[in-house]
Amino acid sequence: MVFCFSEVLVTGAAGYLAIHCVQQLLNEGYRVRGTVRDTNNTAKVKPLIDLKGSDRLELITADLMDKQIWSTYDQFNFTRGFLFSNVMAVFRAVEGCEYVLHIASPCQTVADDSIIQTAIDGTLNVLRAVAKCDTVKKVVLTSSSGAVNQGHKKPHKLFNEDDWTKLEDGRVYVHKYHVSKTMAEQAAWNFVRNETGKCNFKHKEDSFNCA
């Protein structure tokens, strides 16, 4: 394995999909900074700390809805390697990273309208931070097939990147989670179009996982 100096930010690092991304990045020799809701939650953090190469993994407590964390310097806890003690540090979540994998997204079995705005605002907070950071070269946004194939009266068709889940037709029910993923990705693309040249932006459609 060839170690590199590039650092990758992975949001929602404790999620099912994200932890696999973290492992692959560590396997490739990257340094990884992962955001979690609470670095003191051993049940969530331990699987990450136990990963091979976790000496190159930094875990930080970062709420996607906290604009101070994503747009200005602020204080929050971090855990590096096998250390669980909370050490106060002053830095910005995106600071120094070359790549960003935005995987974090609210996911509820019984979802309400609140997850929609949370998904949108969380995504935009990350992108705003990226736009202000000179080191970031590329952003990957994890979306969902539910942002494409829901809400259609005749769903049996071949979908492509021009298709979106239809939200305007109230006759076809669309789960709030799919609404949140649709609107968050649309907000992301609108942001990127308005910030042309600031960063490379790609999205990955994923069918059955949510981080």
Image (spheres, rainbow, N blue to C red):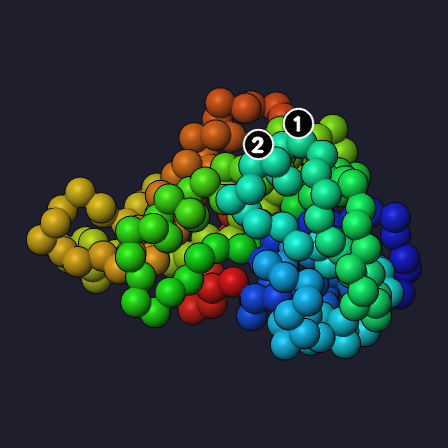
Residue under the image location 34 percent in, 51 percent down? 114
Residue under the image location 83 percent in, 67 percent down? 83
Q: Left or right: where does residue 74 sit relative to residue 96?
A: left
Q: Nearer the viewer, residue 47 or 192?
A: 47
Query: Is residue 186 shown above or below 29?
Result: above
Other residues around mark 1 within 10 Å, as few (<14) / some (14–19) / many (≥20)? some
Q: Nearer the viewer, residue 21 or 78?
A: 78
Q: What residue type is labelled 2?
A: Arg
Marks 2 and 1, how far apart in space?
7 Å
Res. 128 mark? 2
- Answer whether labels 2 and 1 touch (C-beta < 8 Å): yes
Whether residue 112 appears in this view of the structure is yes
- Helix, strand or loop status at disc 2: helix
Res. 132 mark? 1
Res. 177 mark? none
Q: Nearer the viewer, residue 195 or 43?
A: 43
Other residues around mark 2 within 10 Å, as few (<14) / some (14–19) / many (≥20)? some
Query: Is residue 94 shown above or below 132?
Result: below
Q: Which amino acid does label 1 sit on?
A: Lys
